[in-house]
């Protein structure tokens, strides 16, 4: 504490010299200097307040003899008192110097400091027949209007080829930077919003950013804290100019979706559709690729947590729908430049847009392309290529769910291809020997389930017998999540699955991370079936079973999104 107080005391001389320097001249350069020091000054005043808030005035002045001079000078600087946070910290410090019952000359002098009045200024304002508050507001609006017109004039000249040829008029970069810097103290004032809007939407000819980084950061923080309202075009331009703002907005959206793990996928999609991020990323491929990189990082950090994947898939569904509604559509290649385009095209077609009779054929096409890509990754031994293919498949998880459903309904040769697809989704690998061994284990479980799929009366022992094959029921199984997926597909598609669904899920979800995967899988299947145009009797039976199981899981399992030990963990870490 003593050391911190000593550091603060030594900083007083620096800030007092600054205040004297700022007070001696009113040049544009000195005003800029004030604006550029606002954040550091705010932090200094906050530290001072934290130190003196429990002291009396005499103790405060004994500890910081220069505090009266410094605060007194700062009170007369409009760029400081116009800044919300600085003004608040300054008033807090002044209030600490006030004594309701002064006992000595020091405290009386301090009280005089806190009672600042300027009769001359008030008399001048009264001669204009304006209330004081209205005068300041109107003056600010006039200044803002003048600057906005100046920027619009430059823009209209820039947008006219004829005028540009004659006058070569563009916004001088120095002028833009100066205006943006001067805005720092007043960004959050409603009357200043048109100027902030005009600055962000002003297009310059050069490649380098001309607006002050401090200004962009200040606007970004004000937006996140809902202290300012801007047009959509201004917000999008902020994201294009200042990527930390885009990242901050995206992470805030994802955190809001993760914070309530019981939100349905429909609720998640509604929130995503209300976000400007969706429209902006569809119109600007560069923004989408950055958002995709954020999702990638989140999947790596959470070891592919089912909730994180569910949010990625919900965003992708909304994104593809937005692309389809755009008048001018750009090729998917600009959004997914690192993936095989025929695979992107195949996966991006939603199952509801394709007749169910040709789902298997479409899945066969997806698997053939994906297998070829994985084999190429095995030859080149590039783990990044393997991850890119898995990450693309993770965007379009509805096709993985369809594969599980088709496995329970078909008897032909495509079943091995669909089993491979599920295995790649849950355990991506470019090692053929390991892949063949795991596929044989899964095939054994699948064969057991297929024997039971048409039975109208089942008991839990039948399912347990299937699970004990090759120890696929153990927590150590590398294919635990895939096993759960197959069993969920079996329970939802088999004739007798509904009767043993509750007991089966309780058996499978003895651990929290297994419950998370099952919960998200059920939610995804239910969401897809609700969107399906044509339903049959098995779909209605499936929805009843899903509702029952979701209620069971909600009652018995707490839900959180944290890194867990999943079968994907080792794979993900190899890409970091």
Image (cartoon, rainbow, N blue to C red):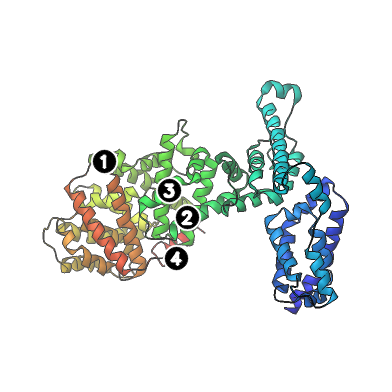
What residue is disc 3 on?
Answer: 315
**Taking 527 as reference, is 117 left or right?**
right
- Disc marking residue 254: 2
Distance (Cα) linking label 4 and label 2: 14 Å
Distance (Cα) linking label 3 and label 1: 21 Å
Closer to the camera in the image, 127 or 564: 127
Q: Residue furthest right?
A: 24
Q: Quadrant of residue 142?
A: top right
Mark 3 residue element: helix
Q: Earlier in the sequence, mark 4 or mark 3?
A: 3
Q: Earlier in the sequence, mark 2 or mark 1?
A: 2
What residue is disc 1 on?
Answer: 533
| Res. 389 in view | no
Q: Earlier in the sequence, mark 3 or mark 1?
A: 3
* Relative height, residue 393 to residue 476 (above, below): above
**Taking 569 as reference, is 115 left or right?**
right
**Taking 320 as reference, is 214 left or right?**
right
Give the number of marks: 4
Label 4, residues with CA under 10 Å away: few <14, some 14-19, many ≥20: some
Closer to the camera in the image, 71 or 374: 71
Q: In the rendered structure, are the residues bearing label 2 and label 1 in contact, judged by CB atoms less than 8 Å apart?
A: no
- Picture residue at 47% right of the left edge, 57% below the top: 256
Q: Earlier in the sequence, mark 1 or mark 4?
A: 1
What residue is disc 4 on?
Answer: 562
Residue 544 in the image: state x and y as whole percent.
Answer: 21, 55
Mark 4 residue element: loop
| Res. 266 in view | yes
**Taking 154 as reference, is 384 left or right?**
left
Label 2, residues with CA under 10 Å away: few <14, some 14-19, many ≥20: some
Foreground mark, 4 or 2, reads 2
- Picture residue at 67% right of the left edge, 41% below the top: 195
Q: Earlier in the sequence, mark 4 or mark 2?
A: 2
């Amino acid at each position: 504490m003593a050391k911190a107080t000593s550091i603060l005391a030594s900083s007083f001389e620096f800030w007092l010299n600054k205040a004297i320097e700022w007070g001696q001249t009113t040049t544009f350069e000195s005003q800029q200097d004030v604006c550029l020091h606002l954040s550091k000054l705010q932090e200094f005043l906050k530290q001072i307040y934290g130190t003196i808030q429990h002291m009396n005035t005499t103790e405060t002045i004994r500890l910081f003899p220069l505090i009266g001079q410094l605060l007194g000078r700062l009170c007369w600087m409009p760029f400081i008192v116009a800044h919300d946070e600085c003004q608040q910290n300054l008033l807090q410090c002044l209030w600490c110097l006030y004594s309701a019952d002064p006992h000595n000359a020091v405290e009386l002098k301090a009280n005089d400091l806190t009672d600042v009045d300027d009769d001359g200024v008030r008399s001048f304002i009264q001669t204009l027949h304006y209330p004081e508050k209205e005068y300041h507001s109107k003056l600010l609006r006039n200044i803002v209007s003048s600057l906005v017109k100046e920027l619009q004039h430059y823009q209209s000249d820039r947008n006219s080829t004829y005028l540009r040829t004659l006058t070569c008029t563009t916004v001088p970069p120095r002028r833009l930077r100066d205006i943006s810097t001067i805005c720092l103290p007043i960004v959050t004032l409603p009357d200043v919003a048109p100027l902030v809007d005009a600055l962000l939407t002003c297009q310059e000819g050069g490649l380098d950013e001309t607006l002050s980084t401090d200004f962009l950061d200040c606007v970004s923080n004000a937006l996140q804290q809902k202290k300012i309202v801007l047009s959509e075009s201004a917000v999008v331009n902020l994201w294009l100019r200042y990527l930390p703002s885009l990242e901050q907005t995206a992470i805030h959206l994802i955190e809001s979706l993760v914070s309530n793990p019981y939100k349905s996928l429909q609720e998640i999609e509604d929130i995503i559709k209300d976000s400007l991020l969706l429209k902006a990323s569809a119109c600007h491929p560069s923004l989408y690729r950055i958002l995709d990189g954020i999702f990638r990082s989140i999947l790596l950090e959470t070891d592919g947590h089912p909730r994180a994947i569910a949010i990625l898939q919900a965003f992708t569904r909304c994104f593809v729908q937005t692309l389809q509604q755009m008048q001018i559509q750009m090729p998917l290649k600009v959004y997914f430049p690192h993936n095989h385009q025929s695979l992107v095209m195949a996966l991006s077609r939603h199952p509801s847009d394709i007749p169910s009779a040709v789902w298997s054929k479409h899945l066969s096409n997806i698997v053939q392309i994906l297998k070829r890509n994985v084999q190429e990754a095995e030859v080149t031994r590039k783990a990044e290529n393997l991850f890119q293919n898995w990450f693309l498949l993770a965007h379009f998880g509805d096709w993985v769910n369809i594969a599980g459903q088709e496995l329970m309904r078909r008897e032909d040769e495509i079943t091995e291809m669909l089993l491979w697809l599920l295995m790649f989704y849950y355990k991506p690998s470019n090692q053929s020997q390991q892949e063949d061994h795991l596929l044989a284990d899964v095939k054994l479980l699948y064969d057991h389930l297929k024997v039971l799929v048409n039975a109208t009366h089942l008991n839990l022992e039948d399912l347990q017998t299937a699970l004990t094959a090759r120890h696929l029921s153990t927590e150590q199984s590398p294919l635990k999540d895939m096993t759960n997926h197959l069993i969920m597909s079996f329970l939802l598609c088999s004739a007798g699955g509904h009767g043993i669904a509750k007991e089966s899920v309780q058996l499978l979800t003895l651990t929290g991370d297994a419950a998370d995967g099952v919960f998200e899988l059920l939610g995804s299947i239910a969401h897809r079936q609700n969107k399906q145009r044509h339903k049959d009797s098995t779909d209605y039976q499936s929805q009843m079973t899903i509702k029952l199981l979701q209620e069971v899981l909600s009652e018995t399992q707490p839900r959180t999104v944290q890194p867990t030990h999943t079968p994907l963990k080792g794979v993900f870490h190899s890409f970091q």
